[in-house]
Image: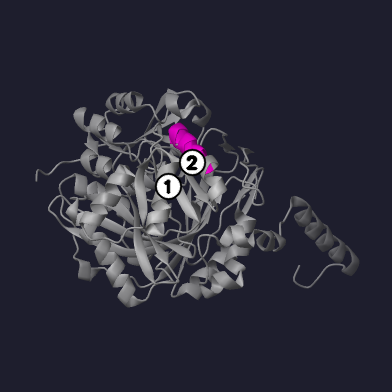
Amino acid sequence: MNKREISKVLIANRGVPAVRIMHTCRDRKIPTTAVYSTPDRLAHHVFMADTAVHIGEAPPVESYLNMDKMIDAALRSKADAIHPGWGFLAENEKFAQKVVDAGLIWVGPSPKVIRLMGDKIEAKELARKTHVPTIPGISDVTDISQIKKWMKSEKIIFPIMIKASAGGGGKGMVKVESEDRIEQAFAQARSEARKAFGDDTVMVEKYIESGRHIEVQIVGDEYGNVIHLFERECTLQRRNQKIIEEAPSPTVDDDLRQEICFTAVRLMREIGYTTAGTVEFIFDSSTRKFYFLEVNTRLQVEHGITELITGLDIVGIMLDVVTGKKLPFKQSDIRPNRWALEVRLNAEDPKTFSPSFGAITRLEIPHGPGVRIASGVYEGADIPPYYDSLFMLLMTAGADREDAVRTMDRALSRNLRVEGIKTLAPLLLSIIRHPAFIKGEFSTRFIEEHMDELISMFKEKTSEDEALKVARYVAEISALGPQKWM
């Protein structure tokens, strides 16, 4: 393979992913170009970059989803590589091809692999061919009679899941509990899929009732080397979107870990995967079996906890691979020696998950041993209503799971303060303090099953609490007079 050099990287993204990628580029003394929409002109990622290019107005189709503007911004700013981060154009094969056709370096897997894995139906068929276990289901469903016929012939019982064939992120996924709900759910899934991905093709699968979400981090180079960086547990979700992840998984033992990780490697080697990607599985706790879900052909939001337990820089690995370098390690070199936890701080009401937008009037970021922050904001920054609500990732690490959870408790309850917007912090704290979470006993339905209980555990602080604390302190000093320590 020809060795190439990167002189400047354009990050085709905003917020948390853009800032994360810029950190690695700074470490390597590679200049960066930020892109921004009009409401993001004062965003954190804009100030952090060496160059910033305005690419359009607020709607994503006019800015962060506009492929031609992205490539034009790279050429104008003399960037010779584009990293898409996660979300927006990260898994868009057409954009990846446009980048390559423009003579730029695409920091990700090949457009061919993105296309192959981007269609859930094709990906599932390929998984079957490589002897990777898949969930019982049917593809390319156009009529509810197909669903009923399949359920009868395969003796499938409710619930089932209707899901969009294209895309991911929990969009276009509808769980069906009974036969009288099939028609409405089918229409809903197709409508959501059409709006989110421009494709209303859907597939139907048996819903794994006591499922847990296990994913394997993979890195590969252009010389056929594919290595796993072990697994992550991503079971705790709301509306089919993850909010707490940990590595390794408390669900699997060493034998199952080896089986699931090498199954992922086998699949990714078969498709010729390069740079970083993730193979996602659903694990049935009742039968101790795992099934293929999908491949994410991009950098995952939760890659940071894998970095914490392995000591590797996954963004750095991606940059090395696309410049023709071999992976500098073998599978036997990867030996995790810590436990790590990540929570997603979204700008949302923790009781209803309704978006919460506006200016962050106060921001205190956790510090101390075992804490890592990936932030896309600063105090005074504005959270616009046009994009994903994630504004910060809070990660903690410890010698074992108990240690990592204890550090997360300290970070959320003692050291984090966000005012001006609502966040998921109270819910996240309630979850990590719940006895079932502490024991590692939960499924993808944990939040919906325990929501009322979790809300009852909220201990929300307000600025009035702080004012009362100060007033009490002043009153005590006034009553007792000067103290020796003063």
Q: Nearer the viewer, residue 95 or 211?
A: 211
Badge 1 crowding class, 10 Å Cα cut-off, few under 14, some 14 to 19, many 20 or more, is many
Q: Indicate yes or no whether the magenta region holds residue 195.
A: yes
Question: Residue at 20% of width from left, 49% of height from top?
Answer: 321
Mark 1 or 2 closer to N-term?
1
**Which residue, given by chain and number where applicable, does mark 2 sit on?**
186
Q: Nearer the viewer, residue 107 or 481?
A: 107
- Whether tag 1 and tag 2 are in contact, CB under 8 A, the answer is yes
Vertically, is 158 above or below 89? below
Q: Position of residue 218 (x, y in %)?
A: 28, 57
Q: Position of residue 193 (x, y in %)?
A: 44, 37
- What amino acid is labelled 2 in the image? Phe
SS category of the residue bearing label 2: helix
* Residues shaded magenta: 185-196
Q: Nearer the viewer, residue 322 or 247?
A: 247
Q: Position of residue 394 (x, y in %)?
A: 50, 56
Badge 2 crowding class, 10 Å Cα cut-off, few under 14, some 14 to 19, many 20 or more, is many
Q: Nearer the viewer, residue 455 or 45?
A: 455
Vertically, is 434 above or below 108? below
On residue 147, which mark appears? 1
Q: Nearer the viewer, mark 1 or mark 2?
A: 1
Residue 155 in view in this figure: yes
